[in-house]
Amino acid sequence: MNSETEIENSKSPIPNSKEKNLARLKIVAVIFTILGAALFAYFIYSVGWRDILRGVSRIGFGGFLFIQFLYLLRIAARATAWKLSVSEPYKLNVRDTLPAVIIGEALSSLIPLGVLVSGTAKAVAVKKRVPFVVGLSSVATENLFYSLATGLFICLGAFAFLRSFELADGWIWTIDTLIAIIILLIVVGIAMIVRQWHWASNLCHWFYNRHIGRRFLESGRAQVRQFENLIYGFYRQYPRRFAPIILLQAAYHFIGVCEVWFILSRISASAANFYTAFLLESISRIITIVFKLIPFLVGVDEAGAQFVSETMALGAGVGITVAIIRKGRILFWTSIGLIFILKRELSLSEITKPLE
């Protein structure tokens, strides 16, 4: 009798805390998206849609195409960095990684919590060229380099912003705390790779031994271990690739600053300097990271740009106009990404598996 009860209990579904957390995140994402849309409408109303339209019109068709070209260079930089992050005997070419990066960025921008499926989407997009686990681990390796370069870029921008302008004590404390957290995360990340801490696979074993998600973890924990070994093995095998990958990630951010600089030169001659563009782009990176769960960063991107432009006394609508023009660029490349998804007949259920 007791054995039968145990069998029945083993068959009964065990509450999946991950699914519950994802459900909560989806609700938060929807709420934030609605608030962001309201915030976006407020900024359009406060600045005046005519003034914003006037600024956008100064870009012109040729300027819009040039902005798309600059972003293509940025995508190419990350696609090349990803190519260099693949371990032998496997190999990916830029013609493989470039469309995959566009697909990942499109999904990341389009759907709430898209950041959770961006990496999976890239790996799925190249699964005919390399095994899925290899593709996913190479994406994770490239993301580690990207996170390092982005963290340093944000710290530099936040430090420059903090030291260049008079801010309220609350803002000073917030920015200092942000810098400290980023530096701490960078140090921990480097230590994890150097010391090869298998936190993810050990956590999977911990769940498995407590009968949590055993059906998935029966084979999944071995894949997670392989995933970690591929990342840590890359650190040991290819130290000479580190400098090129970091330089490519730095180029990604540098071209982003050039994009803002170009937009400023078209809409406001007084604000068209590289330092202003650097500050606007660094704040934009922070907002992108913190509010990535909101599709297209609607509202919050404009809020951040407005904060910087007002602090720097650039004019009420300059920051918002820059954010709206760049949002047009995001919409353009998102549509290209969706075309790639349809052309390759990728399975959305497979891509969005982390959200299920």
Image (spheres, rainbow, N blue to C red):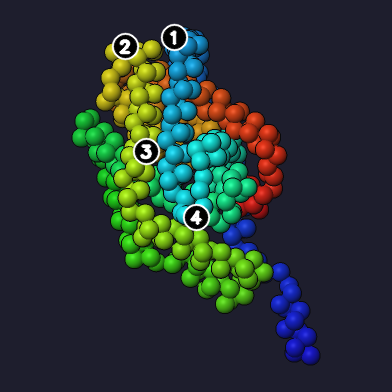
**Is 23 on the left-hand or right-hand side of 235?**
right
Q: Nearer the viewer, mark 2 or mark 3?
A: 3
Q: What whole-number distance in Å separates the C-alpha atoms at marks 2 and 3? A: 30 Å
Q: Which residue, given by chain and number where applicable, does mark 1 sit on? A: 58
Which residue type carries mark 2?
Ala
* Amino acid marked by disc 3: Leu
Residue 269: mark: 2
Answer yes or no: do the residues labelled 4 and 1 have beta carbons within 8 Å? Answer: no
Residues packed near mark 2 inside 10 Å, few (<14), some (14 to 19) or many (20 plus): few
Q: Residues within 10 Å of mark 3 (few under 14, many from 20)?
A: many
Q: Residue at x 63, y 33 (%)?
A: 340
Residue 248 image label: 3
Q: What is the x, y in percent for residue 125?
A: 60, 43
Q: Secondary structure at mark 3?
A: helix
- The amino acid type of the residue labelled 1 equals Arg
Residue 187 vs 8, above or below: the answer is above
Give the residue at mark 4: 89
